[in-house]
Image (tube, helix red, strand yellow):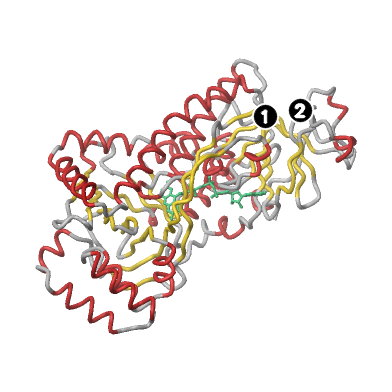
Amino acid sequence: MSLRFLGIRRTLATYVASSAAPKLQDVVIIGGGPAGLSMLTALKNNQKTKHLKCTLIEASDLGKIHGFYDNPGEEYTNRVVSLTPKSIDFMQSKIGNWEFIKHDRIKFYDRIVAYDAQDSDNARVDFNASATETGALAAMAENINIQSSLLKKLEVLNDTESTTILDKTKVEEIINPNQQNIEETHDLNEIDLNAGNANLDWPILKLSNGESIQTRLLIGADGYNSPARKFARIESRGWQYNTFGVVATIKLEYEDYRSIGWQRFLSTGPLAILPLTEDNATIVWSSTPELSQILLKTNKEIFPHLVNAAMVLDEVDLQYLYKLLDYNPDDFTVLDEIKWRLDKFDQQKLEENYPLKVTEVLDGSRARFPLKLSHADTYISPRVALIGDAAHTIHPLAGQGLNMGQSDVAFLMAALESGIERGLDIGSTLVLDSYVANAWPSNHMLLGICDKLHKVFSTDYYPIVALRGLGLRSINLLDSVKDVMVKIISSR
Ligand SMILES: Cc1cc2nc3c(=O)[nH]c(=O)nc-3n(C[C@H](O)[C@H](O)[C@H](O)COP(=O)(O)OP(=O)(O)OC[C@H]3O[C@@H](n4cnc5c(N)ncnc54)[C@H](O)[C@@H]3O)c2cc1C
């Protein structure tokens, strides 16, 4: 699909007649994920940048995502993110897609309760939104809801002259025309020599549909394995956590009017239950590779009980349950094992201080994603800028990955606007420098904080367990400290 539904056709004033010559663009974005689509829509919704000739290239089919706007389906999809008030404000005031979000599929929440499984009293910290201007800590939204609202906004902007989206099209190769061996490896006819050599350093992209595009600025929104980053020879540093995030869409016993996000720190990684509308909720269960396999294969009638157990029971009990289920994922005796253990708790306390009971997991909603930390040394090189997961990936325990991508888009837009105002070439590092100067340090700080949190909470080394229990209790008593933490998180 070349997004005919957007009414967008390839109509480029700069298109060079020769069939071998690449099409020329001001901006090419690789990646139609949340970051890439946000970037394209932000460019097209801005008076100073909307004239730029832009192409977005996405390997997968965007048709289903676009279809979500008219037919969202009854059940929640399993890729759900927590959006900060700052990201929502950016979508409302700058990108303009928030009006096309399916609001009946957005759940605002105003409290987060985080507690420690290895502390005998489940030491906890309870954040609430009183310190925020919006009165909400964050909003849960499906990735598909966000992406579809961006496509809808582009459709409404109806910029048939200078917007092209090519989905089901892969960027197969990116060539630097300045490469010394260009004559050996590529036909020089492919470079637009009519352009007076002005574009001789513009990257050329070879696409799976046989087309070539040459661009003034290449934006890599192409995820963790970013071909754009590799082309620009930008190093990305980090590590795999040897941990998977298991996600699932679940039903609670009834709608929880408390609007709380819950997170329990287990030695295998944090387990979060985050509210969706009505009786729906989503989980992200960070797990060892072995545990993630067990969680995926456990019988769907047993799985909800296992989640309930994991939010309350001691680790030693949980290890025993995992062992039984590893041996036999359909072992229904596990239900009795869980029941008599949970029955020992004061039921009223359970209801007041813990999440509501999970009663169902939606068919096909369980999936796992490898978790890793990565950060590119820089986000720019001449004619290239990286945004979103192409620039950084983060542990999901603080729900910041997609939000960091929004913040990248905001900073890159500011740099491009300012470059255009000053009459500069938007692909030059003179323009792009301010993007990396503004975006990189705060992303680096957040990556570091989440990494330390993950490490501190996934150890069972007694001195650290004792210290963090003390830390959680102290923070919980200090409203001013909690307010500062909430403000920092929600203003990202
Ligand atoms: C379990 C889990 C929970 C999470 N929870 C949260 C949360 O609560 N809050 C939050 O903010 N973030 C969260 N995140 C992170 C968030 O999902 C990601 O940061 C975000 O989706 C990344 O978006 P992106 O557009 O940068 O990259 P991607 O979504 O990876 O998009 C990259 C796109 O580039 C395309 N592409 C790549 N190579 C090519 C090529 N050669 N040619 C054409 N196209 C190409 C791909 O097809 C893909 O569509 C979570 C992540 C996980 C794993």
- Report how far apart the C-alphas of labels 2 and 1 lie in the structure: 8 Å
Quadrant hosting residue 229: top right
Quadrant hosting residue 391: top right
Ligand 1 within 8 Å of the CB at mark 2: no
Graded by Cα atoms within 10 Å as few (under 14), some (14 to 19) or many (20 or more), the crowding at tag 2 reads some
The quarter of the picture where the C terminus appears is top left
Q: Amino acid at mark 1?
A: Arg
The quarter of the picture where the N terminus appears is bottom right
Do labels 2 and 1 touch, CB within 8 Å? yes
295 with respect to 354 (left or right): right
Q: Residue at x 47, y 26 (%)?
A: 438
Graded by Cα atoms within 10 Å as few (under 14), some (14 to 19) or many (20 or more), the crowding at tag 1 reads many
Taking 187 as reference, is 318 above or below it?
Answer: below
Residue at the extreme top of the image, as rendered: 422
The image shows residue 201 at horizontal and vertical percentages of 76, 27
Q: Label 1: state its secondary structure.
A: loop
Disc with the residue nearer the chain's start (2 vs 1): 2
The image shows residue 464 at horizontal and vertical percentages of 24, 47
Q: Label 2: state its secondary structure.
A: loop
Q: Amino acid at mark 2?
A: Asp
In this rendered view, identify the residue nearer to me: 298 or 110.
298
The image shows residue 164 at horizontal and vertical percentages of 69, 43
User: How many numbered marks, from 0 up?
Assistant: 2
Pointer 1 residue = 383
Q: Which mark is residue 278?
A: none
Ligand 1 within 8 Å of the CB at mark 1: no
In this rendered view, identify the residue nearer to me: 473 or 382.
473
Q: Residue at x 69, y 37 (%)?
A: 162
Pointer 2 residue = 201
Q: Residue at x 33, y 74 (%)?
A: 323
426 with respect to 339 (left or right): right
The image shows residue 334 at horizontal and vertical percentages of 28, 80
